[in-house]
Every structure is written in C-alpha cells, then in structure tokens.
Image: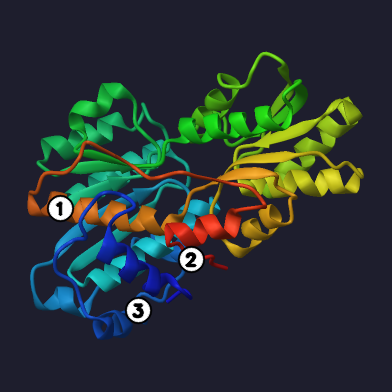
C-alpha cells in the first residue's frame, strides 16, 4: 500500500467533512485490507489494460458490489493513474467490492465498447471517466436502458446526456482556472503578457481550464500565444522553447493546465535563463509538485488531490449499487496554494504528500 494512503482513507472516511458525505457501509478490517493488498499488487496501467478486477476476501464472504469503471488514459495521465491506484486500494479496504477497471487509452469508441462489456458482465454500477463528453453519450444510454446506474467522474458529460446519468463526482475545472486567473492578476495589477500551455485539444478538462482562465483575466493581461502540450512534460518543454524563440523577454508569465506541463515548461525557461512566474491550474500533491511550489518555481496553483477523488467516487458508486439516493453533482473542495502556504494547506485539508 502506498505510504500514507491507508492512514488517509481511515481519516477521510471517519470524518467525511471535506466533501459533506458519509462513508460507505460495510468493509473489511485493517487485517482484511492487509491480506488483500498483496492480491491487488498489480500496476494500475497493467490491470486496466487487462480488465483485472480487485476482489477482497471480505467480498467473497458476503454481498459483493460489482463496480465497473472505464477510464480515459491510465498510465499517461499522472493524476488519473494515481486516482486508479487509490481507487483500487480503497476498494480493498472497503471489503465488499469487486472492482473492474478498463482503460480506453483516449479512444471514445473503445470506451463505449468497454461499457458494453461491463453491461454484459452485469455490473451493479458503471463509472465513466469520459474521453469525450458528447460522443460517450450512446454508451451511457445503453447502460441506462440495461437498468445499470452510470456515473461520471472528473470529466463532465454534455448536458444532452444528463438523462442517462445517475451522478457526477469531480472537481470544478473551470473554477480552478478562475482561481489561477485571480492569482496572476494579483501578481500583475498593471497587466502583463502571458503564454498559455493547455492539455489535449478537444478534451473537456483542458477546455474548461482554458476557458476559465481566458474568460477571467482582466483586460490588461494579454495572451501572446496558446499551445497544447497534451498533458506531456516533454511536449510542454518543446512548445515553451518555441514560444521563447518567438517572443523572448516579451513573456512576463506562463499559465499551464497542470503541474506536469508547468515543470516541462520550466525546463525550457531555465535553459533560456528566464525567470518568470508560472501558474499551474492544478497540482496533484505529490513530493515533486510540492517541491516546485515550495521553492517558488511554480508561483501558484490549486490543489486537486487523488485521495478524496477515489473515496468519493467509490462511496457514491456503492450507494448507487445499494439503491440509495445520491447527489446529482458532488464537487471537491479546491485549495489555492503558493510557496508560503502549500504544505500547511495540504496538512489542514488532511491530505498526504505522496511520492
């Protein structure tokens, strides 16, 4: 089990104050979680590719909630990969869940096919981390027509698919970007020139984080150029290198869609001996990202931790499997951070810094 994860899950489910929800019923003891963690000791990416399920000893002895999940891009997206790890470990601790995770590798047609597979497997609930908020809707419709509750996480679907959806759980990516725009405006009250590095074109999280920023910065902040980095550190560095060559010291600041992109861009800035503020729309609370913020390399960001993500998603899925009422939308709390408060914010929120 990841260092600190078990401690976090116990604290989070005991208090349930951050997200205004109750912990799920049932579940194994610490001994059960320990016994079953070895059985689930497969890397997240490998397990997702094979559709391997996590079933605990406690689940084998009583009622089992069959929870299926179709992910977007485990193994490529760092945050999604960590969420998957946390979800599997939390499922083992709960003790009455058979969790099957399939990964679509960014392809929505694959994702719809995987939903169909989970329908055939008679899943009690299906969780979707959508590749595309509109094209995924036929898959949601099939699950609904099969009588299986379906919920989405992290990437909201288009409103035209709401009738098929039982719940959405995830952060408000637009609001994260608004917070970042406010940070940048506070740093440059007289205005500045900023370059922007986004995630993957057409992916809704990337769109929300771009729109939230662009629609919230004041008129005296000018975006010189926007390029996509596909959530990839190396590509972010390459894109930043190109913009440095084009604009040089006209660039006053950088806005990046997440911490991984920000770090790649920083490598380019460092090579060019440029020292400018970097705002990352979200960081995932690992040792590397915390270090970059604490040292002021990333000037500001918004904490989005995978631990409450996993807990809330699975707790909501179990409630749906039991036929209990759930909120249509559950949002996570957001935590703006700078070098002055990053560790304190993480501690106050009850999260762990992970590696």
Mark on residue 319? 1
Q: Are marks 1 and 3 in contact (CB under 8 Å)?
A: no
How crowded pointer 1 is (Cα within 10 Å; few <14, some 14-19, many 20+) is rated as: some
How crowded pointer 2 is (Cα within 10 Å; few <14, some 14-19, many 20+) is rated as: some
Residue at position x 20%, y 77% in the image: 28
Which residue is denoted by mark 3 in the rendering? 37
Q: Quarter of the image holding residue 157?
A: top left
**Image position of 52 with respect to 109: above or below:** below
In this view, the residue in front, 115 or 351, is 351
Q: CA distance from mark 3 to mark 2?
A: 19 Å
Residue 209 place in picture, x, y as percent:
53, 31
Task: Tell me the quarter of the image containing the C terminus.
Answer: bottom right
Residue 139 place in picture, x, y as percent:
26, 36
Determine whether the residue tagged by mark 1 lies in a helix, strand or loop: helix
Q: Quarter of the image holding residue 327?
A: top left
Which residue is denoted by mark 2 in the rendering? 352
Residue 122 showing in the rendered view: no
**Image position of 168 with respect to 191: above or below:** below
């Amino acid at each position: 089990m990841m260092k600190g994860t078990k401690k976090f899950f116990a604290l989070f489910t005991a208090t349930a104050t951050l997200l205004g929800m109750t912990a799920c019923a049932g579940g194994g003891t610490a001994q059960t979680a320990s016994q079953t963690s070895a059985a689930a000791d497969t890397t997240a990416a490998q397990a997702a590719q094979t559709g391997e399920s996590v079933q605990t000893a406690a689940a084998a002895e009583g009622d089992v909630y069959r929870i299926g999940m179709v992910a977007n891009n485990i193994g490529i997206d760092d945050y999604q990969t960590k969420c998957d790890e946390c979800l599997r470990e939390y499922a083992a601790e709960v003790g009455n869940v058979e969790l099957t995770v399939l990964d679509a590798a960014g392809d929505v047609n694959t994702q719809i096919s995987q939903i169909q597979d989970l329908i055939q497997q008679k899943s009690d609930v299906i969780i979707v981390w959508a590749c595309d908020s509109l094209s995924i809707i036929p898959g949601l419709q099939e699950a609904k027509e099969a009588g299986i509750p379906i919920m989405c996480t992290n990437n909201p679907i288009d409103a035209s698919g709401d009738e098929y959806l039982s719940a959405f759980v995830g952060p408000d990516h637009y609001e994260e970007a608004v917070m970042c725009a406010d940070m940048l405006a506070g740093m440059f009250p007289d205005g500045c020139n900023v370059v922007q590095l986004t995630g993957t074109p057409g992916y809704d999280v990337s769109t929300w984080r771009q729109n939230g920023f662009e629609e919230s910065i004041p008129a005296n902040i000018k975006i010189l150029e926007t390029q996509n980095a596909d959530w990839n550190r190396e590509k972010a560095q390459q894109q930043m290198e190109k913009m440095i060559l084009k604009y040089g010291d006209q660039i006053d600041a950088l806005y990046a869609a997440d911490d991984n992109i920000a770090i790649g861009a920083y490598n380019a800035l460092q090579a060019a001996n440029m020292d400018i503020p970097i705002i990352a729309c979200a960081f995932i609370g690992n040792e590397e990202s915390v270090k970059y913020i604490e040292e002021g390399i990333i000037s500001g960001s918004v904490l989005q931790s995978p631990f409450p993500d996993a807990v809330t998603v699975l707790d909501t899925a179990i409630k749906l499997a039991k036929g209990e009422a759930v909120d249509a939308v559950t949002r996570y709390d957001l935590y703006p951070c700078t070098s002055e408060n990053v560790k304190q914010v993480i501690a106050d929120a009850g999260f762990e810094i992970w590696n």
